[in-house]
Image (cartoon, coloured by chain):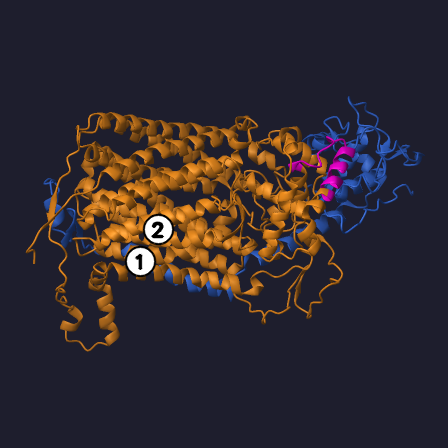
Chain colours: A orange, B blue
């Protein structure tokens, strides 16, 4: 077969670039993490500067770590490994360069726009629409470069690492496009095409799978390449690779709704999310087993090799986090854990342990090979390992303690049956010491990354004058492929009379069929796409089509133009990073906040603001709870109202002017998405907003607040806060004068009436 | 394979190398551990059981559980209220004698009330509680009612959900003890000036501080409902 040998070499220059920016953005992302950790421990670290307040910086931290640090590490590792696994150079050097610089541009734009308060407020998808388009383009460039490389390969079969890369590329494309569907309103602001419950569903379908297909599958791919290379050991089980790959890819997609237990999401979706999360446990652990068991026989090497040390701890944290994920998805556990720091500890075990340490191990393994010299200091790498491990432990132990403390305090009742800690701030103050421990843990981890930087710099300094580019030889893929003979089937050979099904099952249990898929990349990619899309559609279609998921509430009406402007400020300041807008049907919550949230209350919420963490109290029933003056003083100086509050002060909202003309654009955009604004609102939104602002500002001045605030942002925000969650307690309006809707007598559930209008008979789906 | 120390022992067990390699990486084809398979299939078979039990069977879903919990709580609360007997000005006044009740109430005042009514009850966002002018009546039963039900349209919370019935009564008595204390920086009087028996001495204080007029009603931002909250006339004996 190998009549003719072709010569080729590998492009390591692009890998060197990606490795450097991985380190650089990792440093930036973690530094921002330390800043926001400080802000929680001591709110004066917000310095009353808009662009560094917690609400604006937290998205920068998550985006920088996920897309800049982890993202660039994926690109570095993928580009290094696919060339070698496929025996070919990268598809196109220009595409590689566009990919590299395009991705760095996206990161820079993120680092500028997020602190400015330009955000979609969907977690890990905060970047506004122009950047989203750029991400899509650059991601496609990456995809073309990878698939082009696969097309030019000289190795017929795709190794398991590449299966994971393919799953990553396909799934992230789908997730990114469908979660970010939005109507641009201005260059810096868009409104999602989904509202309320559906927006929440799409966001957590995305959010969960972004973790799955950006923090998990590509890293499993990297593990499958770098771990056996570093250990010089065969992978434990090919069978396990197949089974855990497909089960992971298929099952992962379903699990998103576990982020929305006890919310206004329909119960059937919540149940599906939980059950698939439980099923996900073993597929995830398949990766851990294949990683750790690959080290059988070389454990003594782990003691002396920092690279293997990093890998072992990374895979162990992967195992821990993927056990904890299913655990947290159990409704009864989520009851306690949701909105607490437990989730934060969980994701940091994953991000610092699994992603961080796997990245560090990979970089230490790559440095001598990329710079063609010895690593400057193995001792320093060892030190990095130990200080990093201590950092992770300090971080997660303190934050697990914080999460449990807070969860238990929120739920605690006294003997008389009343909330034991009815003042939210009591539960916050209890966490402050743990927040300080987190800062120390974060600093230790950060110090480790600095050590790696020094090691990288010194290694780079002793590189050769010109890099040697070795030339390899391999035959091209033959046009025809002689299929291997079918292996012996014990069942057929036994001569027993068995059903056809049994033979097929036997064939399925043996892995030859999969071997055939591995040499057909197009078929393989299509199968992955089907697995991901089918699983998604099973949940998406019912969520959007079953009307009973979101029963209409007659008294819920669109926000007034001023309230809408206030809501946009709420979104822009990132209030959702600390405040949920979702009271769960749990007595401890309804006693604290008020009636639990109903799906029909959110139909005009674009984007939804349910939040995922309560650093401060839930706000869904804040409307009408306090006087306007309370809000004015509280936003200006939270600690003058609540002693010990860790909320940042927002004095600029009292001085910055509201752009009343812009309100018209916002109203029009929402109307285009189907929000029923009146002719008056569509034509005179600025005037209506000004009138409402005048009334509020006059009221404030009369109560002893500052006068002359009618043109300021704070008034819009107060209007929104006072409106929030109040619609369900209003009396239903008289029938609208303009249009007459046929209201058949429908089932009523408290104040909720099913709108029977033009919808088909309602199906109850459980 | 560089590691000669351990390899022989391992290679002779079940590890079978497959005939392919990628950039030097080889693979075994070891069978999956039994426990792995058991949990994997177990988690799959668990799903239909769970769905049948909770969605079509006797399992209680969160919203129904919530209803059960609330019903039980309301029953208990009704019992407690009955046990407390009739709430009168005299019965509330008697609570002032209990040092323990008053010191607990003082702590609760500092933690919960002081943000709006001032640390020394001198007033702030909410009215001054030390002077003899009152918006919603100064008799202990009237104060009790204001605490229990709140004045939502003016920002006073309804505390009945936050404090036990006995504590609500003690809070009313505690507010009664503040009468006549002279705090620093008192907020100007609001409402009607009343004598200790609750009779009106001066009908209206200075304009701007008294009963809500249209312009001083706190806006909830939704004025199209057009409802001005009607303040109850609280001075009838």
Q: Which residue corresponds to the image point at 36% horizontal and 45% vertical from the top-left?
A: A215
Q: Quadrant of residue B208?
A: top right
Q: Can residue A217 be seen in this view?
A: no
Residue for badge 1: A246
Q: Can residue A485 be seen in this view?
A: yes
Span colored in magenta: A691-714
Residue at the bottom extreme? A497
Report helix, strand or loop for mark 1: helix
Q: Is residue A252 above or below residue A394?
A: below
Subunit of mark 1?
Answer: A
Spatial CA distance of label 1 from label 2 is: 23 Å
Closer to us: B99 or A204: A204
**Does the magenta portion include A765?**
no
Closer to us: A350 or A177: A177
Q: In this view, does A585 lie above or below A368?
A: below
Percent from the top left, x then y, of residue A414? Answer: 62, 41
Q: Is residue A120 above or below residue A697?
A: below
Residue for badge 2: A140
Question: Could you confirm whether marks 1 and 2 are on the same chain?
Answer: yes
Closer to us: A523 or A8: A8
Subunit of mark 2?
Answer: A
Percent from the top left, x then y, of residue A19? Answer: 29, 36
Closer to us: A280 or A573: A573
Percent from the top left, x then y, of residue A152? Answer: 20, 53
User: In the rendered picture of this protein, how many numbered marks are placed on residues?
Assistant: 2
Report helix, strand or loop for mark 2: helix
The quadrant of the image that shows the C terminus of chain B is top right
Percent from the top left, x then y, of residue A694? Answer: 74, 40
**Does the magenta portion include A696?**
yes
The quadrant of the image that shows the N terminus of chain B is top left
């Amino acid at each position: 077969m190998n009549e003719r040998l072709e010569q080729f070499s590998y492009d390591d220059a692009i890998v060197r670039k990606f490795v450097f920016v991985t380190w650089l953005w990792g440093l930036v992302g973690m530094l921002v993490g330390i800043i926001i950790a400080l802000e929680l421990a001591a709110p004066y670290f917000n310095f009353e500067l808009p662009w560094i307040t917690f609400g604006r910086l937290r998205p920068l931290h998550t985006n920088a770590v996920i897309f800049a640090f982890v993202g660039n590490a994926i690109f570095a590792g993928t580009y290094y490994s696919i060339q070698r696994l496929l025996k070919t150079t990268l598809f196109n050097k220009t595409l590689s360069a566009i990919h590299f610089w395009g991705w760095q541009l996206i990161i820079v734009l993120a680092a500028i726009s997020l602190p400015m308060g330009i955000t979609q407020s969907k977690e890990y998808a905060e970047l506004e629409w122009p950047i989203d388009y750029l991400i899509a383009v650059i991601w496609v460039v990456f995809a073309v470069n990878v698939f082009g490389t696969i097309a030019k390969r000289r190795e017929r079969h795709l190794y398991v690492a590449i299966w994971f890369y393919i799953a990553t590329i396909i799934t992230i494309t789908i997730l990114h496009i469908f979660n970010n569907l939005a109507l641009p309103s201005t260059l810096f602001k868009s409104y999602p095409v989904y509202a309320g419950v559906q927006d929440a569903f799409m966001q957590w379908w995305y959010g969960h799978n972004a973790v799955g297909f950006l923090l998990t599958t590509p890293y499993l791919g990297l593990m499958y390449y770098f771990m056996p290379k570093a250990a010089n050991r065969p992978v434990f089980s090919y069978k396990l690779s197949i089974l855990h790959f497909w089960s992971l890819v298929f099952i992962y997609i379903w699990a998103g709704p576990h982020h929305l237990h006890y919310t206004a999401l329909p119960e059937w979706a919540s149940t599906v999310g939980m059950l698939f999360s439980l099923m996900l446990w073993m597929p995830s652990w398949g990766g851990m087993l294949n990683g750790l068991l690959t080290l059988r026989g070389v454990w003594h090497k782990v003691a002396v090799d920092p690279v293997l040390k990093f890998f072992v701890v990374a895979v162990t944290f992967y195992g821990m986090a993927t056990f904890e994920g299913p655990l947290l998805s159990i409704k009864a556990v989520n009851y306690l854990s949701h909105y607490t720091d437990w989730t934060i500890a969980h994701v940091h075990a994953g991000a610092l342990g699994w992603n961080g340490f796997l990245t560090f191990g990979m970089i230490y393994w790559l440095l001598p090979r990329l710079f063609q010299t010895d690593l400057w200091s193995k001792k320093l790498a060892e030190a990095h390992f130990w200080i990093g491990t201590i950092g992770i432990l300090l971080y997660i132990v303190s934050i697990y303690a914080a999460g449990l403390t807070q969860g238990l305090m929120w739920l605690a009742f006294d003997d008389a049956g009343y909330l034991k800690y009815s003042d939210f701030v009591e539960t916050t103050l209890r966490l402050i010491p743990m927040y300080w421990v987190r800062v120390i843990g974060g600093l230790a981890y950060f110090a480790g990354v600095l050590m790696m930087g020094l090691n990288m710099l010194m290694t780079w300094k002793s590189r050769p004058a010109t890099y040697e580019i070795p030339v390899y030889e391999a035959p091209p893929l033959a046009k025809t492929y002689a299929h291997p003979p079918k292996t012996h089937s014990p069942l057929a050979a036994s001569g027993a009379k068995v059903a056809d099904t049994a033979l097929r099952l036997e064939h399925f249990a043996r892995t030859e069929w999969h071997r055939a898929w591995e040499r057909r990349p197009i078929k393989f990619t299509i199968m992955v796409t089907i697995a991901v899309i089918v699983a998604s559609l099973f949940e998406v279609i019912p969520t959007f089509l079953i009307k009973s998921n979101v029963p209409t509430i007659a008294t819920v009406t669109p926000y007034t133009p001023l309230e809408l402007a206030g809501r946009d400020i709420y979104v822009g300041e990132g209030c959702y990073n600390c405040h949920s807008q979702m009271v769960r049907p749990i007595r401890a919550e309804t006693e604290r906040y008020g009636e639990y949230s109903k799906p029909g209350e959110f139909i005009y919420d674009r984007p939804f603001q349910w939040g995922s963490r309560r650093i401060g109290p839930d706000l869904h029933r804040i409307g009408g709870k306090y006087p306007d003056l309370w809000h004015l003083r509280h936003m200006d100086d939270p600690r003058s109202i609540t002693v010990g509050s860790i909320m940042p002060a927002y004095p600029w909202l009292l001085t910055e002017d509201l752009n009343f003309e812009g309100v018209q654009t916002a109203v029009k955009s929402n109307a285009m998405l189907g929000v029923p604004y009146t002719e008056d609102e569509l034509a005179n939104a600025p005037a209506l907003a000004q009138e409402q602002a005048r009334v509020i500002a006059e009221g404030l001045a009369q109560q002893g607040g500052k006068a002359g605030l009618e043109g300021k942002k704070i008034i819009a925000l107060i209007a929104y806060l006072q409106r929030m969650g109040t619609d369900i307690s209003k009396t239903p309006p008289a029938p609208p004068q303009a249009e007459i809707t046929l209201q058949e007598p429908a089932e009523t559930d408290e104040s909720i009436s099913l709108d029977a209008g033009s919808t088909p008979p309602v199906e109850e789906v459980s | 394979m560089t590691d000669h120390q351990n390899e022989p022992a391992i290679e002779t067990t079940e590890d079978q190398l497959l005939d392919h390699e990628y950039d030097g990486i080889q693979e075994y084809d070891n069978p999956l551990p039994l426990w792995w398979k058991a949990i994997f299939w177990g988690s799959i078979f668990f799903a239909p059981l769970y769905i049948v039990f909770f969605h079509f069977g006797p399992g209680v879903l969160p919203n129904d559980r919530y209803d059960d919990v609330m019903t039980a709580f309301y029953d208990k609360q009704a019992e407690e209220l009955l046990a407390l007997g009739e709430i009168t000005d005299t019965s509330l006044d008697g609570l002032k004698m209990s040092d323990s009740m008053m010191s607990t109430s003082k702590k609760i005042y500092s933690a919960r009330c002081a943000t709006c009514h001032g640390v020394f009850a001198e007033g702030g966002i909410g009215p001054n509680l030390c002077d003899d002018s009152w918006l919603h009546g100064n008799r202990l039963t009237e104060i009790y009612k204001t605490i229990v039900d709140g004045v939502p349209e003016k920002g006073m919370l309804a505390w009945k959900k936050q404090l036990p019935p006995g504590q609500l009564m003690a809070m009313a008595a505690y507010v009664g003890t503040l009468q006549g204390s002279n705090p620093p920086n008192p907020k100007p009087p609001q409402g009607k000036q009343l004598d200790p028996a609750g009779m009106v001495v001066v009908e209206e204080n200075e304009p701007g501080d008294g009963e809500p007029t249209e312009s001083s009603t706190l806006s909830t931002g939704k004025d199209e409902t057009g409802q001005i909250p009607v303040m109850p006339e609280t001075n009838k004996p």
